[in-house]
Amino acid sequence: MPPATTRLIALLVAAAFVVILNETIMSVALPQLMREFSVTAATAQWLTTGFMLTMAVVIPFTGWMLVRLPLRTVFIIAMTTFTLGTLLASLAPVFVVLVAGRVVQAVGTAIMIPLLMTTVLNVVPANRRGRTMGVISIVIAVAPAIGPTVGGLVLESLSWRWMFWLVLPIGILALVAGAMLIRNVTEPRPIPLDIFSGVLSAVGFAGLIFGLSSIGEAANHSALITPWIPIAVGVAALAVFVWRQLSLKDNALLDVRAFTFPTFTVSLSLMLVSMMSLFGTLILLPLYMQQVLGTSTLESGLALLPGGLLMGVLGFFVGRSFDRIGARPLIIPGAILAAAGLWGMYLFFQTDSSLIVVVAWHMVLSVGLAFLFSPLMTSALGSLPPHLYSHGSALLNTLQQVAAAAGTALFITVMTLGIVSGAESGKDDVAAQMTGVHNALLLGAIVSLIAVVGVFFVRNSAQTEGPATEHVVADPATATAH
């Protein structure tokens, strides 16, 4: 690829890594924040779930933004919003303001990932997309995976506010660099913004994720409303939203015709199952290590580091392998390993387990997910024609947030119900916590079997179905600055 294209992708990947890292960086701080702000685990999870909810609401608009606005403008909007949210969170005097800061951060994050994916699809030839998407998989999977480790390192000697103070200058630096270096690589065209679709999308995805996340609070008898009400409203709004998009066709806010491509639909579905497992375990394992095993925030964060690093290293090699051998030789063993990791956690995690056991099974899960993420993502997006690239990446990222929220909510809910059941049966606090953790891990292990079956239905091809590029400026350095 031309050097300017390489620099463009490198900058976008670095910026995306920083913003996505913040999605899970707060997970190891939950016990400390629960004590400081006097909130329950089900309420504290909103620091992560609120982040994902906001992303699910904003991402559908990115398909329109990436067609309508120059690349440089979209990048500046994303990084400015993220930086302002980081500043707000670092100064938060109460829990509600902290959540608000996370929400503003999430707006920038929601824009950044579809921006990165759409740019790659437009500037990278089809026969090299696997290795490039392998790098992107590090951003999408590894950044959240090592977020708890970064959080643990910060909390060992500093307050939780430094999680934001340390990120703030990095965000400012990325913003300045992007404003100076990024040029447009697509041709913006004026398309109308359908306000009614935007409202339906916001109500639908927000209702669905809010309801899923409230299940945990309902299990703890602290939910404001019955969670099934927002879930029902969300499903109804999304049904009307889909009908509206099909009627708008080329002017759709989010073109759902991408689902008419079988490879996209199957691969995306398996990505969603994998994201449920990843985010469910990322919020569950720190709670298990700190509240059952009695580890510190640093120890629990470091215990997740080997798996996160392993996923990152493998992501690059898996992407290169996809370009040579296709998806199925990678995703079949990946699904089996991911399932083995979750079943191993369920069977071997006890109240007296060592951290070595936790690290080992987390690494097994991480290897499996590394073999799944990049091939599934490349297969899904690469099967689409160029005019659906931005919409396909927006659909993928929106539904990933729904899946992540569902995984978080289900794991927390099942754990909470298990703790209540254990306490009612006369178990002490640690034993009751262990019952909840076991129940949640069993749920994740059962869900993982869906992926084991589904991977056999993914089309095996190292080449994408659509053209490599279309109406693309070959070298961003020669593009017109916007």
Image (cartoon, grey):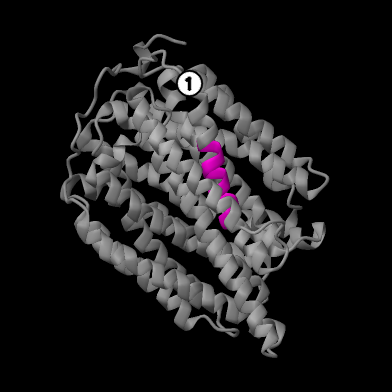
Q: Tell me which amino acid carries mark 1.
A: Leu
In the image, taking residue 111 as reference, residue 104 lies left or right, namely right
Q: Is the magenta stretch mostly helix, strand or loop?
A: helix
Residue 313 x %, y %: 38, 53
* Residue 124, picture quadrant: top left
Q: Which residue is drawn at 64% across and 32% down?
A: 83
- The local crowd at label 1, few if under 14, some if 14 to 19, many if 20 or more residues have their Cα within 10 Å, is some
Name the residue located 44 percent from the left edge and 21 percent from the top edge: 71
Q: Name the residue under label 1.
A: 193
Residue at the bottom extreme, as displayed: 426
Q: Quick check: 183 left or right of 295?
A: left
Indicate yes or no whether the magenta region holds residue 418.
no
Whether residue 25 is visible here, answered yes or no, is no
Q: Position of residue 86 (x, y in %)?
A: 68, 38
Determine the secondary structure under disc 1.
loop
The residue sitting at 58% across, 58% down in the picture is 228
Q: In which quarter of the image is the N terminus?
A: top left
Q: Does 466 sit above or below residue 130? A: above
Residue 69 appears left or right of 303? left
Residue found at x 60% / y 54%:
229
In depth, the one of 458 and 173 nearer the eye is 458
User: Compared with residue 176, is residue 275 higher up or lower down, i.e. above or below?
Assistant: below
> What residue span does the magenta drawing correspond to?
201-212
Circle count = 1
Residue found at the far top of this picture: 480
